[in-house]
Image (tube, coloured by chain):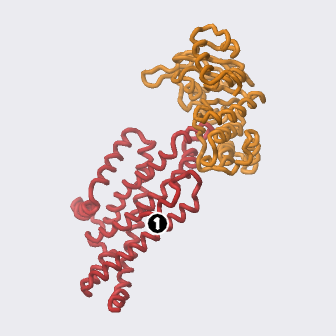
Amino acid sequence: MENLELIIDALPYLLEGTLVTIQLTFWSLLIGIVVGLPIAFAQVYGNKVMQGIVAVYERLARSIPLLVMLLLINYGLPRLGLRIPIFRAAVIGIGLRSAAYQSQIYRGAIQSVGGSQMKAARSLGMGKLKAFFYIIAPQAIRIAIPPVANESAIVLKDTSLAFTIGVVELLRQGEYFIATSNQPMVIYLTIAAIYFILTTIVNGGLSLFEKKYQIPGIGIEGGHSDAY
Amino acid sequence: MPTKHLLKIEDLHHSFGEEEVLKGISFSLDKGETKVIVGPSGTGKSTILNNIIRLVPPKKGKIYLEDIEITSAKKINEIRQQIGFVFQDFGLFNHLTAKGNIMIGLTKVKKMNKKEAEELAMLELDRVGLKEYANSYPSQLSGGQKQRVGIARALAMQPKLILFDEPTSSLDPELTGEVLKVMRNLAEEGMTMLVVTHEMGFARSVADELIFMEAGNIVEQGNPEKLFTDPDHQRTREFLFQLTDLYGAGEN
C-alpha cells in the first residue's frame, strides 16, 4: 500500500521525465535517419572516396561507447567554443551513433533487393532514380522495418545515458524522487516498467505497420520484430 | 552508316579488365527473324545482349537499331523501351504481382493510364498462359511461371525485338518446356528474337539462323540444319554434337 502511494506520488515526475525520454528518442532517431540514409546511399552508389569517408565515420561511431561519446560532446564542444544545451548534446551523440547503425540497416536492405531487379528496371527504360523509387525503395523499406524497430528500441533505452550529462529525463527524474523518498527499488522498478511499456509500443507499432504492408516473399516472415 | 536491317552489329569488341571477351562480332537481324547464339560458357554470348541495350556499354564497335546508331545514342532509355530483354534469373520485381510487374513499365515509362495498362497486362498474361496468376507475387510462382511473366513484361512494352539471355538456364528441366513453348509461339507469330541458349532442340527447330561462338569470335553461322548435320568447321561439329548428346536433339 505504501509502495503504491509512493508510485502514485512519483508518477507525475516520472511521466515528466518520460516525455523528455520520448523527445530524446524522437530527435535521435530522426538524426539517425537524416544522416544514416545518405551514408547508406554513399556506400551503395557512391565512389571509392565517399565509401572510404563513410567507412571511417561508421568505424568511429561504432567503436566509441555512447557514454564516452556523450561526455566528449558535452565537455569537448564548449572547449572548441561551441556552447550547446545538454539536451542537444545528448541528441547529437545518440543520433550520430544511431546513424552509423541505421546506415548499415538501410545499406543491407537496399543491397538485398539485388542488382538484377535494378537491371530489369533499366531494361524497361527506367532511369536510375525512377528505378530506385518504384522498384528498390518499396522493397528495401519493408526489409528494413524489423531491424529499424530493433534499433528504435535500443535508442529509446540508451537515452537513459543522457542522465550522465545532466539531462532530466526519466531516469534522472527518478533519482530526484529517490533522494527525497529513499525508496530506490520501488522507483527503479517503476522506471523499468515504463521503459518496458515504451519499447513494447514502439515494436508493436512497427510490427503492425510491417504486417499491414506485408508482401509474400519480401522480408523475414513470421513477425521478426516481435522479438526485442 | 544507315542500315536496312532491324538490328545490325558491326565489329563489336568488349573486355572485362585485361580479358577480351568479344573480339569483333558482326551480324544482323531482320524483322521477324529468330537467331540463336550458342557456344561454350564464357564466350561472351550474354555480353553481346548486354552491349546491345547498354546494360554493359560496349568498348568498341557499332550497333544499329534500324537506322539509328545506338552504341552512343544519348536517349538510351527510349531505345531500351524498344528492345525487350528476358533475363536468366527472371529479374521480376518481388513487391509487385505478375500483373503489376507488367504494368509498371507501361505506367511509369510509357505513361499509359492505369486502366489501359491493366488491360494490356492481362492480354499479355493470357498470351503466356498465366491469366489466372495475375494477382500472384513472384514468390508464389514456379520458375517457369516467373520466366513467362518476364516474357509477358517484355512483350507488353511492344518492343521491336526481344533479347533472351539464357531464359531457361536457371529452370529445372521439367519447367523449361513451358517457357520454350511460349518462345516458339512468339517466333511463329513473327516476333524478332535474338536468343542465347543451350537448348539445342529449340535452336534447331526454331532458329532461322544459328550463330556458333567460341572465345569471343563467331566460328560459324548459318542454317541450323546445316550446322547440325554438315558444318564447315570441325569445332562446330564437336560442340553441337556434345550438346545434342547432353540435351537431346529432339523437340523440347
- Quadrant hosting residue A163: bottom left
Q: Dot 1 surroundings within 10 Å: few (below 14), some, or many (20 or more)?
A: many
Q: Tell me the residue at 42%/45% (across/down).
A: A42
Q: Position of residue A121 (x, y in %)?
A: 59, 41
Q: Is residue A179 visible?
A: yes
Q: What amino acid type is highlighted by mark number 1?
A: Asn
- Quadrant hosting residue B125: top right
Residue A99 horizontal side relative to residue B201, left or right: left
Residue projecting furthest to the right: B189
Residue B211 horizontal side relative to residue A223, left or right: right
In the rendered image, the quadrant that contains the C terminus of chain B is: top right
In this rendering, the answer to whether A23 lies above or below B169 is below
Report the residue marked by disc 1: A203
Chain that is coloured orange in the picture = B
Q: Nearer the viewer, residue B57 or A209?
A: A209
Task: Give the color of chain A as drawn.
Answer: red
Q: How many marks?
A: 1
In this rendering, the answer to whether B175 lies above or below A104 is above
Q: Nearer the viewer, residue B235 or A149?
A: B235
Q: Tell me the residue at 53%/21% (across/down).
A: B43
Q: Tell me the residue at 72%/32% (across/down).
A: B181
| Circle 1: element type | helix
Q: Position of residue A7 (x, y in %)?
A: 35, 86
In the rendered image, the quadrant that contains the N terminus of chain B is: top right
Q: Nearer the viewer, residue B3 or B220?
A: B220
Residue A108 horizontal side relative to residue A209, left or right: left
Q: Chain for mark 1?
A: A
Q: Is residue A81 visible?
A: no
Q: Position of residue B3 (x, y in %)?
A: 69, 19
